[in-house]
Image: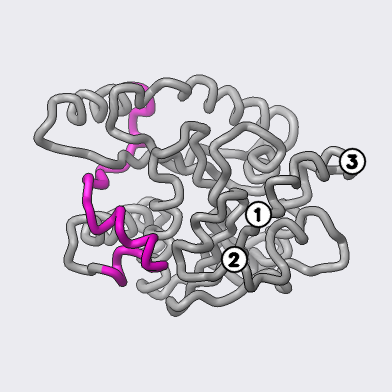
Amino acid sequence: MKMIGGKYVGKAIAIFNQKGGVGKTTTNINLAACLALKGKKILVLDIDPQGNTTSGVGISKKDLKVTTHEILIEDTYKPEDAIIPTGIKNLDIMPASVQLAGAEVELIQIAGREKRLKKAIDQVKPNYDYIFVDCPPSLGLLTINSLTAVDSVLIPIQCEFYALEGVSQLMSTIEIVKKNSNPDLQIEGVILSMFDGRTNLSIQVVEEVKKYFKEKVYTTVIPRNVRLAEAPSHGMPVIQYDPKSSGARAYIEFADEFLNNEGDM
């Protein structure tokens, strides 16, 4: 937490890569859960219409009354109206619903549309140590809202052949947001996922990504792991589903490295 205007407020971080299938939601759920189990007060905010973070922490989407959609589009709700506890101590979620798919069109008619999420996040920042926003894999208004609302961006990159494809577009999106609506936006770090130490390709990708992002790349890498892939279908972070798996151990290590970088151990 940092002090602003005599009050402590948490740090908001967007987990973003416009490429799909790179481990955004997996990182959002599992980093958040590991930090919560270490005693940090965490909010995950699902702004992806697919709602995978929501179901991945065991929340049924069909029972939701107020979600990120209502907070973005309507002025009758406060952010707290959409926040619900998960089954993990210290971990809350502002869930997504399928209605978010129409939010891009609805936002176009609203004044100050790119700052709707920022308004909501600023209201709840004093209640949390960290707020993680799971962005959709696109560069539309939902993503612009997310990047405008946060302090920094955490970029998951998969250890695969096209890993760096689209990274220059991602960086130019961040630069556009910095220029137009969030001048203080920083790169939090880059986490490499789906690493397979038996392949030369994975090792080459790590080297390439480190060349591009330099000291911003976390030392921890997330391995390919069946239990990590299975956990969301059971509505659990991997640390609950199989705490002894290599995936769970990697995210615990990542949470430690993350806190160490923040000076928050």
Spot the residue most to the left: 198
The crowd level at tag 3 (other Cα within 10 Å; few <14, some 14-19, many 20+) is few
18 displayed left or right of 83: left
Residue at 54%, 50% in the rendered image: 134
Determine which quarter of the picture holds residue 96: bottom right
* Residue at mark 3: 109
Q: Reading the chain from its start, which is encountered first: label 3 or label 1? A: 1
- The three-letter code of the residue at mark 2 reads Lys
**Residue on which the image places disc 1:** 98
Q: Secondary structure at mark 2?
A: helix
| Labels 2 & 1 near each other (Cβ < 8 A) | yes
Residue 71 in the figure: left or right of residue 265: right
Q: Identify which residue is drawn at 63% across, 73% down.
A: 63
Q: Nearer the viewer, residue 187 or 79?
A: 79
Q: Residue at x 73, y 59 (%)?
A: 120
Check disc 1 and report its element: helix, strand or loop. Answer: helix
Label 3 amino acid? Answer: Gln
Within the magenta stretch, is there residue 31?
no
Magenta-colored span? 212-241
Is 122 left or right of 192, judged from the image as shown?
right
Q: Nearer the viewer, mark 3 or mark 1?
A: 1
